[in-house]
Image: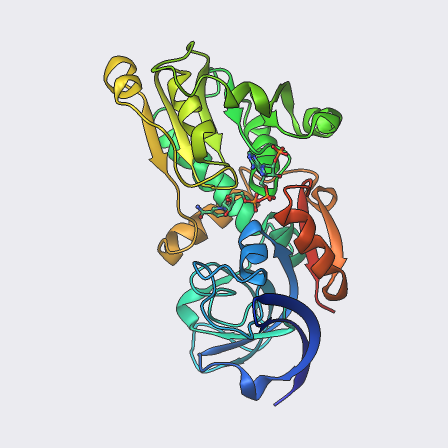
């Protein structure tokens, strides 16, 4: 048994409040692997959990944090030994299982990946679920036939966690990237990540009533959903694909069949949470070698547990730029 610090979201009437508390490892759920968390990261989904979204977290009090990287403190399985450096993302972590915003987590061995040799624990959480998702989106587009000579690739929600890493990865892989953002002042940041064209979000919000739009994009990574997503579908080049992973602009959109039957475009769904562990592991391997970003340490701002509640408000308001790395020590 060990006492540790964790962030906890409490429900009081209609309100949800997140504060720093002391917990004990004996209060953690059963599981094969106890992990001393060194780093976590802040994703939009964590902010949904911390603000009482029942689609993410049903019961409170709760410790959010869908990402965790740390060292094994106890293990009842042969696959993991005390001291192993490991990564856990997704499944139920931080949803209804106490998550990475606590200094310890206890989880099933089937959720745990050994840290790939080419990434430090800190680098793995600079990427976190956002990086894993961006990689899955690009992988899915490439499986659908995308090649670096196809151009340009659109990324929506560009300054967000998934968006910013998608731009950096696409640029690293030789793609020409157009970035859609609601933050006009972040043009320099997006160019530094590798975007060669910056598009105001309002341009992607126009034309929802039209059945088709001018063919522009060879492919797209869409992190926002809503009518923006379908406007992207309507402006894909013939045979192009969009990887759809997010919902910050909404879950519903007005759609029609014409882009599919006249231009043969593809709408590809991407889930990073419940996919098999081997698929996650193969993406982490890619992110640690062939797709490794050179500037990973500078890609995320670091915050402590105590600074997280303010960062949660910022990400909920769509105001966060880039990745937030959470230091647990
Ligand atoms: P962030 O908050 O970091 O990024 C979202 C970005 O979307 C914002 O920075 C902003 O970028 C843009 N945005 C915000 N509000 C709106 C709006 N009302 N309309 C249009 N654009 C908006 O979130 P994450 O990067 O962590 O996650 C992005 C999305 O992907 C979330 O919906 C998340 O739930 C989802 N997700 C899904 C996963 C999966 O497995 N399918 C895994 C990980 C994330 P800008 O100002 O530049 O436009």
Q: Position of residue 111 (x, y in %)?
A: 43, 65
In the image, 80 versus 245, the foreground residue is: 245
Across and down, in percent, residue 309 comes to 70, 60
Residue located at (46% from left, 69% from top) = 96
Q: Is residue 310 above or below residue 193?
A: below
Residue at 55%, 68% in the rendered image:
99
User: Which is nearer the eye, 106 or 283?
Assistant: 106
Q: At x 53% / y 53%, what residue is drawn? A: 45
Q: Where 66 falls versus 167 (above or below)?
A: below
The one of 46 and 117 positioned closer to us in this rendering: 46
Res. 146 visible in picture: no
Q: Which quarter of the rendering shows the N terminus?
A: bottom right
For residue 145, side relative to residue 90 (left or right): left
Image position of 191 (left or right of 240): right
Q: Quadrant of the C terminus?
A: bottom right
* Residue 184 visible to the viewer: yes
Above-or-below relation of 281 to 113: above
């Amino acid at each position: 048994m060990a006492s540790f610090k964790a962030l906890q979201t409490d429900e009081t009437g209609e309100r949800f409040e997140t504060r720093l508390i002391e917990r004990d490892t004996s209060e953690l759920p059963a599981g094969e692997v106890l992990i001393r968390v060194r780093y976590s990261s802040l994703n939009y989904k964590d902010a949904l959990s911390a603000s009482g979204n029942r689609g993410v977290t049903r019961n409170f009090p709760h410790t959010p944090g869908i990402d965790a990287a740390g060292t094994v403190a106890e293990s009842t399985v042969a696959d993991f030994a005390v001291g192993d450096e490991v990564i856990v993302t997704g499944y139920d972590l931080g949803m209804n299982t106490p998550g990475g915003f606590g200094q310890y987590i206890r989880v099933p061995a089937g959720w745990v990946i050994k840290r790939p040799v080419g990434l430090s624990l800190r680098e793995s959480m600079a990427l976190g679920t956002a990086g894993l998702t961006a990689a899955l989106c690009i992988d899915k587009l490439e499986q659908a036939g995308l090649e670096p000579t196809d151009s340009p690739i659109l990324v929506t929600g560009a300054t967000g966690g998934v968006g910013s890493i998608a731009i950096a990865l696409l640029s690293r892989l030789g793609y020409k990237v157009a970035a859609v953002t609601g933050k006009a002042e972040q043009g320099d940041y997006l160019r530094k990540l590798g975007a060669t064209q910056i598009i105001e979000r309002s341009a992607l919000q126009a034309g929802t009533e039209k059945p088709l739009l001018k063919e522009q994009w060879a492919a797209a990574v869409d992190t926002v959903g809503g009518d923006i997503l379908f406007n992207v579908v309507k402006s894909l080049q013939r045979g192009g694909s969009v990887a759809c992973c997010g919902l910050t602009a909404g879950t519903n959109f007005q759609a029609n069949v014409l882009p599919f039957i006249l231009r043969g475009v593809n709408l590809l769904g991407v889930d990073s949470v419940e996919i098999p562990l081997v698929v996650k592991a193969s993406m982490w391997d890619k992110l640690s070698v062939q797709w490794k970003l050179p500037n990973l340490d500078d890609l995320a701002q670091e915050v402590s547990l105590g600074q997280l509640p303010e960062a949660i408000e910022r990400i909920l308001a769509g105001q966060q730029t880039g990745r937030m790395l959470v230091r647990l020590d």
